[in-house]
Amino acid sequence: MNQLIDVGIIGGGPAGMSAALALGRARKSVVVIDEGRPRNRVTRESHGFLTRDGITPSEFRRIAREQISAYSSVHFVEDTAVTITGHDGNFLISTAQGTTYQSKKLLFAVGMKDLPLPVNGLAEVYGKSAFVCPYCDGWELRDQPLVLIANGEKALHLAKMLSGWTHQYTICTNGPDQFTEEQRMELLQHRVPVFDSPIERIVSVDGMVQRVNLVDGNSISCTGIFFAPKLVAGSDLPKALGCQVSEAGMVIVDSFGKTSVPGVYSAGDAATTQYQVIAAAALGSVAGMSINNELLVEEWNRQS
Ligand SMILES: Cc1cc2nc3c(=O)[nH]c(=O)nc-3n(C[C@H](O)[C@H](O)[C@H](O)COP(=O)(O)OP(=O)(O)OC[C@H]3O[C@@H](n4cnc5c(N)ncnc54)[C@H](O)[C@@H]3O)c2cc1C
């Protein structure tokens, strides 16, 4: 595509699609480049989005795309953005399939990636009976015996969070525990059992966890697992373009989604720690409207 479009959106998850909706309704030309690997693709159901509680991620995406198709200035392409050069007013986006798009503004809605924990059997249960966020999947596992695979501060945080859904849980640190003496006392006080043996295997049937076997011979029966994944940025492109990012890989933005690079915005998981579909969609919408405002003011000033 050689023509200069208004906005190039990298990432077509809830944040990117929501921005595209706002921009399409504002009559802006938009290309959404999406490689189709949203964070929640492993789950059977997505929870907590008002009016869409329990929907499959693919159905959510289908409805969103169908509704956005009413705005003909928005185009979706299945591709991966690999390099971005240029500056405010003229960015060049090159993709894996060899296409180049030219846009006045950019939105990174690239999400975050969960790196798989090296635990035997976790891949079989991830998204079916092993989850990362109590707000997303705690209700379905309420009052059930759970195992938390986490260590140190993250384990304590997860334990506090899960206490709202069940009191039957055990922490497996999967190797030497990294608790401070104070944290150990806190867990003892709340009667949370802690096992520090490495995990030998998670035993499951059809994706439903049955027990967690430890190398030291212990076996913990449970019907669900929560774990703390290692998260990394969904794409290195924001950093490569000069956007300020946190140590954890989050793009630093203001309350309108504006990054430190003129003309470049970011929204959704890529630019927040509130990892929820509804939050990603809201932030995408705000960024879309902010980009539109910027384009309108620039055009207005050009004509003054
Ligand atoms: C197991 C699990 C279960 C979850 N369950 C829930 C739930 O029940 N309810 C809830 O509210 N939240 C849930 N979440 C969180 C939710 O998935 C995220 O908050 C949400 O997907 C964030 O939307 P996003 O648009 O920011 O990013 P994503 O949905 O991750 O979308 C980012 C998109 O950008 C694409 N992309 C990245 N880089 C490039 C590139 N260079 N070129 C082209 N495309 C690119 C990716 O492939 C992806 O399609 C869950 C997360 C996990 C891990």
Image (cartoon, grey):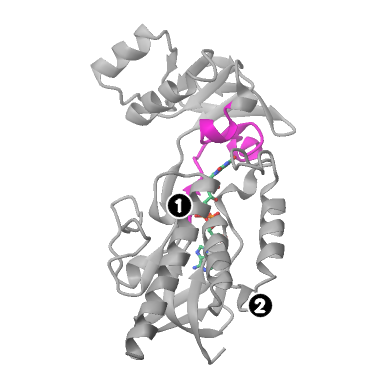
Residue at 36% of width from left, 60% of height from top?
256
The residue lying at 53 percent from left, 70 percent from top is 23
Which element is circle 2 on? loop
Residue 186 visible here = yes
* Circle 2 Cα neighbour tier, 10 Å, few/some/many (<14 / 14–19 / ≥20): few
Image: 209 above or below 193: below
Image x and y of residue 54, in percent: 68, 39
The C terminus lies in which quarter of the figure? bottom left
Q: Quadrant of the N terminus?
A: bottom right
Residue bearing mark 1: 269
State which quadrant residue 83 falls in.
bottom left
Residue at mark 2 to residue at mark 1: CA–CA distance: 27 Å
Can I make out residue 214 in this image?
no
Q: Bounds of the magenta span?
A: 111-138
83 lies above or below 50:
below
Q: In which quarter of the image is residue 69?
A: bottom right
**Residue marked by disc 2:** 72
Residue 108 percent coordinates (x, y)? 44, 66
Residue at the limit of the structure toward the left, as seen here: 181
Disc 1 residue lies near ligand 1 with CB under 8 A: yes
- The reply to whether the magenta stretch includes residue 161 is no
Which is nearer the N-term, disc 2 or disc 1? Answer: 2
Which mark is drawn over residue 45?
none
Q: Quadrant of residue 224?
A: top right
Category of crowding for the residue at label 1, using alpha-carbon neighbours closer than 10 angstroms: few (below 14), some (14–19), many (at least 20):
many
Residue sitting at x 63%, y 39% = 127
Q: Does any atom of ligand 1 lie closer than 8 Å to the CB of label 2?
A: no
Q: Between residue 65 and residue 40, name the one nearer to us.
A: 65
In-front residue for pair 113/68: 68
